Amino acid sequence: MVSLQSLTALGKREATIVTHGPMTITERTDVALASLAARKGRMADLDKAAKAAGVPLPGPATHRTGTPYSAFWTAPEIWFVEAPYATHELIADLLKTAFGESASITEQTDAWVAFDLAAADLTPVLERLCNVDFSFVPAGYATRTVMEHLGVYLIKHDLGAARIYGPRSSAESLLHAIKTAAHSLW
Amino acid sequence: MLIHHPILGPRDAQEFVYLGDASLIDRPDGMTAGVDAFHDYLYNRTNPAGEHQELWYHEQGDRSWLVVTRNTVTHEITKVELARDVARARGRTK
């Protein structure tokens, strides 16, 4: 029997953790992701199913944390749903069962790389990376933006905690950009 | 330049891609409208010096299509709507 070992987006066995000065970058390999899009005219059904399944449906440009499902808004009537990988590896199948014909669901886990940034204040790093006014936007803000020419999602948990989802095939470039921004500061 | 996105608020114009005249929404029915109507739709634009309705795409944001009313002389933006709402108001989609 073939024995396969999973690799992270950076091609390693273990998640990468980089510390530079007061900032820590942690690659998150323990998050399962799926996109959830309402089908035409089925928003009411989707709402009902979301309540039953405990999937939050936050408003525009926001992220809402829940257990086991968290979610952030990506476009009108479209969300990204997050869950712990250990228990929800088959997140798309689980959501498909919960939402039935009311929504279109796409597995996203292996399309993205997730980096958690932690520092006392991430504003100086993020203002070097993207055009989001990080100190101004509220905690729980989630938006799509551009870093190093890559389309990414940026989620602000608070001033010192943020998560970036970037394209998995450009994981190394994104990490390099974040490290470069950190090195220019500290 | 800032574009006041109807859902996301003011966003940098660099996040958007410009497509062109919003009359592109009014595509004639290919089965009944005839060749001339389609020729006009494809090639003819009014190109006004003044108020102009344009299609912009929020490429680096939520990827929505917008109809932006912009003065081509002063670049003042007077109105931004979701293209979906505009198309529905014109009876394009149900």
Image: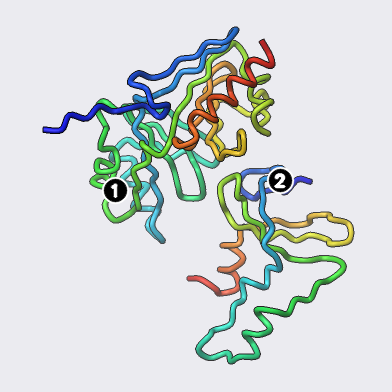
* Tag 2 residue: B14
Q: Please identify the residue farthest to the front as the structure is shown.
A: A2
- Please name the residue that numbered disc 1 is placed on: A99
Kindly identify the residue that appears in the image at 78 percent across and 66 percent down.
B52
For numbered disc 2, what is the local secondary structure? helix
Query: Where residue A117 appears, x then y in whole percent?
Result: 52, 19
The residue closer to the viewer here, B21 or A101, is B21
Where in the figure is residue B83, as x and y percent of width and height? 61, 62
Q: How many marks?
A: 2
Relative to the observer, which residue lies in front, A109 or A98? A109
Foreground residue among A77 and A19: A19
Rendered-image quadrant of the N terminus of chain A: top left
Image coordinates of residue B20 in percent, x first then y, are: 70, 65
Quarter in which the C terminus of chain A is drawn = top right
> Would you say A145 lies left or right of B22 here?
left
Residue at the location (43% across, 18% down)? Answer: A16
Badge 2 and badge 1 in a common chain: no
Chain at numbered mark 2: B
Tell me the SS state at disc 1. Answer: helix
Q: In the rendering, which numbered label is found on residue A31?
A: none
Amino acid type, mark 2: Gln
